Image: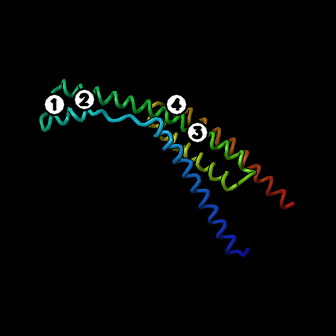
Amino acid sequence: MGYGDQMENQIFRIIFVVFVGLLVAFFVGFGIDAFYPEPVYPQAIQDMWTMLGSKTPTAEELATINALEQAFQLQQQTHNRIVSIVVTIAAVIFLALSVLLEDKNRVMANGIMLGGLFSLLYGAARGLGSQDSMVTFITVGVGLAAVVLIGLRRFSHAREASSAQRD
């Protein structure tokens, strides 16, 4: 195999790793949305604004609208908190799976690891939307611990293997 073929093979490997990583992240995100959809903005708020038309709302109407919007925001925050936790768990599972697969298929393992990393970022972003700094801190901490442990395992193992080949 010539240098051009090797370079082409490496490029396709990189593309494949990124593609698998994106698919894993999409799988996690769309899976959560399929089984735990986001809260829907209350139709009652829109109906009230439609009913008011161009009239200025009274204090009572504004209080009702504000109460409905606050209830919706609380639903969103709760939803984001749960999504953040579930995504972090899924990401750690995919990171662990990448370690299990590293000896069988390095390219696939790297793609799954990248998907786990993308999912961790998504989980952290959803955690920020929860407005719960404790949950965000814990999920980011769990993600950091998983990344450090898996990074130590994966990359120190690769370094040992490459130095053994040189000997």
Mark positioned earlier in the residue sequence (2 or 1)? 1
Q: Are marks 2 and 1 in contact (CB under 8 Å)?
A: yes
Q: Are marks 3 and 4 in contact (CB under 8 Å)?
A: no
SS of the residue under disc 3: helix
Residue picked out by circle 1: 57
Q: Which mark is residue 90?
A: 3
Real-space Cα separation, disc 2 to disc 1, in angstroms: 10 Å
Q: Are marks 2 and 3 in contact (CB under 8 Å)?
A: no
The amino acid on which the numbered mark 3 sits, given as a three-letter code, is Ala
Real-space Cα separation, disc 4 to disc 1, in angstroms: 38 Å
The amino acid on which the numbered mark 1 sits, given as a three-letter code, is Pro
Residue picked out by circle 4: 135
Label 3 crowding class (10 Å Cα cut-off): few <14, some 14-19, many 20+? some
Mark positioned earlier in the residue sequence (1 or 3)? 1
Label 1 crowding class (10 Å Cα cut-off): few <14, some 14-19, many 20+? some
Q: Residue furthest right?
A: 167
Identify whether 18 is placed above or below 90. Answer: below
Residue picked out by circle 2: 65
Mark positioned earlier in the residue sequence (4 or 1)? 1
Q: Residue furthest front?
A: 35
SS of the residue under disc 1: loop
Label 4 crowding class (10 Å Cα cut-off): few <14, some 14-19, many 20+? some
Real-space Cα separation, disc 2 to disc 3, in angstroms: 37 Å
Mark positioned earlier in the residue sequence (3 or 4)? 3
SS of the residue under disc 4: helix
Real-space Cα separation, disc 1 to disc 3, in angstroms: 46 Å
The amino acid on which the numbered mark 4 sits, given as a three-letter code, is Val
Real-space Cα separation, disc 4 to disc 2, in angstroms: 29 Å
Please name whichever residue, 47 or 80, is drawn nearer the observer in this view of the structure. Answer: 47
**What is the x, y in percent for residue 138?**
56, 32
Q: Residue at x 69, y 70 (%)?
A: 6
